[in-house]
Image (spheres, rainbow, N blue to C red):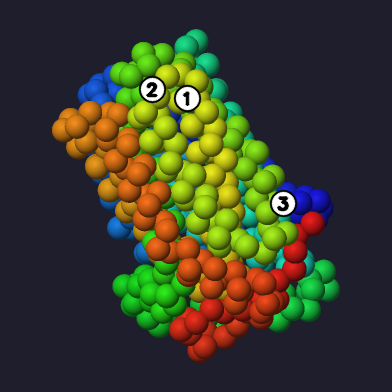
Amino acid sequence: MKNVFANRSMRRLFIAFSGSLIGDGVFALSAVVFAYRSGGASAVGVLAVVRYVVISLVSPFTSTFADQYNRKNVMLVSDLVRLTLVAAAAATVALQGSRWIVYLIVVLVGVAGSAFRPAQGSIIPLLARRTDEIAGANVVSSTVESVGFFAGPALAGFLLAFANIPVAFAFDALTFVWSMGFVASIQSPRPEERSSELAATFDNGSEAAAMRSQSFLARAVQGFRLIGGDASVRTLVILYILQCLVAGASAVFTVAIALRLLHIGSSGLGLMESLLGIGGLLGGFLALMLVERAHLAMDFALGVMVWAAPLVLIAAFPYLGTVLLSMWLIGLANSIVDVNAITILQNIVPNERLGRVLGALEAGQIGGMAIGALLMTVLLHWVGLRFGLALIGGIVTVSVVPGLPSMRKIDRTAFENGVTKRSSAAEGPRHLHHLRWRHTH
């Protein structure tokens, strides 16, 4: 990771990301508390489902901006829109406006953010000076996310205990100002600073020009075609969606565990969310060590299993210690899943199409979250919290097993043997695009 922090633009990207994520953690937990106070657990579940469904539908379209326009500008516009929306939410709550306006803003903030992440993920290879910086940057990104997951809920708990929801929303608005300032200062490395293989690989000017002649719908579906064209990559994305199903369910069951099962209140909810971040922070360093094994896909699949299996543990032993341990394990697995999945895609997908692939992946992720949140809400009413946790955790854990052979294939063809990435748009995604793999130190 030392090479990543030595890269000035990478460093500024992650400083911007860290401030924004901490604010997002504050906003997310505050929005959940607002929904719970104004409409109960059902409101939390319905809001999560609606938000996830809308983001899933728009992500394939908003992700095309990353391949069509300057990625830095896409991130700046996304930050500016979210700054405006979150400030409006703070004002609405402070003035005791309609809760439906706040719910709408929460959804729109997610829509605006759906353009940011594909742009960020696809700009990383363009900011890298050597190939070993790409995987290291994904570890840093995951670590930053984990710190945000830890610091955001902890800060939200403090603000909600000593201030109120409008103050928490206003804090998030300020973090977008922070993010915009650092993103605006990002510059791509000079040609002489880049290794020869990167200089020859990442040039999407002709692809961007070709995109402008296509319809918006045609551009949006290309990410799905790229994923669907390779069976192993398709399996990886399916496993990622399974993990996201559990993540979506967590938007409902974490609140229910804290407030209904353990009765530990909002501060306890913040503690649970913080332990996810602590686990994720350690998971980032673990992912960095595991990358040396060149078994990224298999480690990714095992991470998905560790995401789900702790839910069965909570169902069997519904105690505070078990819950906190499970949150820590889930956070640990989350970093491994995120780092490995994104690193694999960055190495096997042409960069000029990476934004659309990441957008299609995000659509699948959010769709999985929507299903998970809806399923958990239904299970809460039909069979109760504990049986619902056992059902979701058990099914997802077992479902990973059939995908293990495909993960071994990715490791064998893409990382163990060493490969080269194709940058030509004409070559298509019918099998893995290869990039010579260098271990990250």
Residue lying at 53% horizontally and 36% vertically, measured from the top left = 329
Question: Mark 1 — residue?
Answer: 322
Q: What is the number of the mark on residue 131? A: none
**Among the 4 quarters of the image, the one containing residue 384:** top left
Residue 403 visible in the current orientation: yes
> Horizontal and vertical percent for residue 78?
48, 50
Q: Position of residue 73 (x, y in %)?
A: 55, 58
CA separation in Å, label 1 and label 3:
27 Å
Answer few, some or many: residues within 10 Å of disc 3's Cα (few below 14, many 20 plus, some between 14 and 19). Answer: few
Q: Nearer the viewer, mark 2 or mark 3?
A: 2
Which of the marked residues, 1 or 3, is nearer the chain's N terminus?
3
Secondary structure at numbered mark 1: helix
Say what amino acid the circle numbered 2 marks.
Answer: Pro
Q: Amino acid at mark 3?
A: Met
- Residue behind mark 2: 318
Dot 3 falls on a residue whose secondary structure is helix
- Which image quadrant is residue 263 in? top left
